[in-house]
Image (cartoon, rainbow, N blue to C red):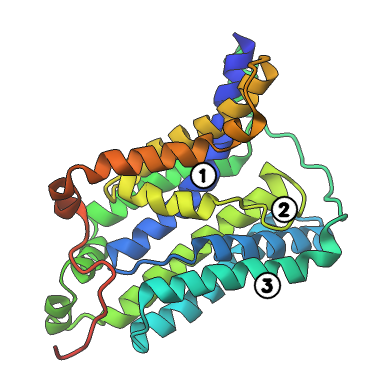
Amino acid sequence: MESYALLLGATLSAGTVLALAALGLLINEKAGIVNLGAEGMMLCAAIAGFATVVHTGSTWLGFGAGMLAGAVLAAIFGVLVIWLNTNQYATGLALSLFGAGFSAFVGLSYVQAKLPSLPKYAIPGLADIPLLGPALFTLHPLVYGAMALVLVMMWFLYRTRAGLVLRAVGESPTSAHALGYPVRRIRLMAVVFGGAMCGLAGAYISTVYTPLWVEGMVSGRGWIALALTTFATWRPARVLLGAYLFGGVTMLQFHLQASGVQLASQLLSMLPYLATIVVLVMISRNPTWIRANMPASLGKPFYPGS
């Protein structure tokens, strides 16, 4: 019983990485922009956050450095695709490749570096509950922050005027422009926010989730986060549920290995990515459902005056 409680806690921690990145990408796509550079932004943020913690000893400063790195890369991407009308998919792929190479180069001197020990977190009272307390209520504050962020985003998107404008820009940028809204600036702000959230996810990986630096340590989570937005049909609550689903599949491989299940480690390692493909195939069987929920201008350039 205790092992299952620990598995649940590990699932929440693993799902937080995906949830943070996917929620940021959700805002991108609500504004009509597809950023395939999530993997590269997360890698650059991971080394930025790790290096900051090595030199300052502060995990929170590391989070800030990761968010800044992700936001800067996203801003560059935004200028290219929003003002210069470069192809969103090709530019995103280029950003992902750049991030992989740049982070590997910058991180060479940090491969053997060690971070200071993380403080122990516990919610008073709840952490003392037998079995579930130590597993669910002693996690990093960012785990609970991701849950709160979902509520904030739901309120923002569906209960505020700013959220309505953002969705209008994603659905019909020409109409939003005709009403006087600065479509390009709104899209850029959405892209920068998405980059900052991917940066936060990357810094969380290298400073809390697995506190070390290894080349390519994001290990495809950026691509899974991109798939999550489609899996969740662009709704924040479903993004969180999907993140925990994929996080659970990721942790399941370690649970099975610890339980003595005789399966090749390579097969267990590919479970999260196999689950991603299966889910996307199942969703794609109903294109009408996807079109009904997908922002109408997603991936399409905007030409003022058109």
Q: Across the whole image, how many numbered discs are drawn on residues? A: 3
Q: Position of residue 287 (x, y in %)?
A: 17, 49
Q: Find disc 3 in the rendering and name its residue.
A: 102
Q: Earlier in the sequence, mark 1 or mark 3?
A: 3
State left or right for residue 40 relative to residue 189: right
Q: Quadrant of residue 258?
A: top right
Q: Earlier in the sequence, mark 1 or mark 2?
A: 2
State left or right for residue 203 relative to residue 303: right
Residue 72 seen by the camera: yes
Q: Find disc 1 in the rendering and name its residue.
A: 145
Q: Position of residue 179 (x, y in %)?
A: 12, 80
The kind of residue on which mark 3 rests is Phe
Q: Earlier in the sequence, mark 3 or mark 2?
A: 2
Q: Quadrant of the N terminus?
A: top right
Q: Position of residue 42 (x, y in %)?
A: 58, 60
Q: Is residue 262 above or below residue 172?
A: above
State left or right for residue 213 relative to residue 74: right
Labelled pair 3, 2 in contact (Cβ < 8 Å): no
Q: Nearer the viewer, residue 24 or 87?
A: 87
The kind of residue on which mark 1 rests is Gly
Q: Secondary structure at mark 3?
A: helix
Task: Name the residue: 83% across, 61% down.
Answer: 110
Q: Find disc 2 in the rendering and name its residue.
A: 59
Distance (Cα) linking label 1 and label 3? 29 Å
